[in-house]
Image: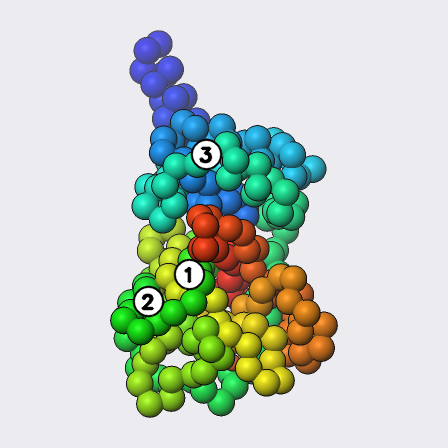
Amino acid sequence: MKQQTRRKFVRLALMVPPVVALAACGEQSPTAQSLTTTTAASTTQAAATTSAITTATATTAAKTTTTAAPATTTQAATTAPATTTQAATTVAQVLPPTPQCSSKAATTIAETEGPYFKPSSPLRTSLLESGITGTKLVVTGYVLSTSCQPVKNALVDFWQADANGQYDNTGFKMRGHQFTDDTGKFYLETVIPGLYPGRTRHIHVKVQAPSQPILTTQLFFPGEARNQTDGIFHQSLLMQVQDITAGAKQGNFNFVLSL
Ligand SMILES: [Fe+2]
């Protein structure tokens, strides 16, 4: 009898979906990153509250966030120390409804590469270096398949103008590539790019799953007046941007590749 019970438990355990897939499918994982909490427990509670306020699918969102919270708390703590409840309230005001992945997710659209891409950028997660000025920006998110599965070891190559709207075409300032971790996550430290003639504010990026085609696209900032006049701008490429500390912002975006 005991053996039958043990077998039943094992079968049930195998039916539980991977935590990492749950975390990656929703926008709530990036939400958890932005919460400035110091413990897993408080992060979970704050994120669940956020979901309840901002989405019509509170139950799913809360479950997703609960599983993701412990994994993202450490990074949140290092990027933006402890101001818990207030930060969670701010997030609740800016997040759109939590996306579902009951059907295929829409792939991230491609955008023009522009004239300033350079291959062989440095491998790094921070573009901050001596001489770089401007408002600090952390860009985080996941690379996912259309079934919301995380894509690990995906190449994510960023390049952008500096805070004065200038590209470094002789060196590699404001350029860098990295690879997603086992949960499909990327993390970039940079500054908010400056405007230059004819364009709205943007960050260029190439994303490539291992041995798959390269997606070249751009990320945009909400609330920019030039978003209305820039022919390259696209609503679906808007990051969710919020303040994380005084003078620093965080942008979240999930790339969905045609996989
Ligand atoms: Fe550009």
Crowd class of label 2 (few under 14; some 14 to 19; many from 20; radius 10 Å)? some
- Decide: is 21 above or below 43: below
Q: Residue at x 56, y 43 (%)?
A: 91
Mark 2, secondary structure of its residue: loop
Mark 3, residue position = 84
The part of the image, by quadrant, that contains residue 146 is bottom right
Kindly identify which numbered label has been placed on residue 3. none
In the picture, the quarter occupied by the N terminus is top left
The alpha-carbon separation of the residues under discs 1 and 2 comes to 9 Å
**Tag 1: Cα neighbours inside 10 Å, few (<14), some, or many (≥20)?**
many
250, above or below 172, in the image: above
Q: In this figure, which residue is indicated by the disc labeled 2?
A: 128
Circle 3 residues within 10 Å: few <14, some 14–19, many ≥20: some
Foreground residue among 87 and 11: 87
Check residue 136 in the rendering and tell me which mark sits there, or answer none. Answer: 1
Q: Are marks 1 and 2 in contact (CB under 8 Å)?
A: yes
Q: Could you say whether the residue bearing mark 3 is in a helix, strand or loop?
A: helix
Q: Relative to 225, is 191 on the left or the right?
A: left
Instruction: Determine contact: label 3, label 2, CB under 8 Å.
Output: no
Q: Earlier in the sequence, mark 3 or mark 2?
A: 3
Q: CA distance from mark 3 to mark 1?
A: 20 Å
Q: Position of residue 32 (x, y in %)?
A: 47, 41
Q: Amino acid at mark 3?
A: Thr
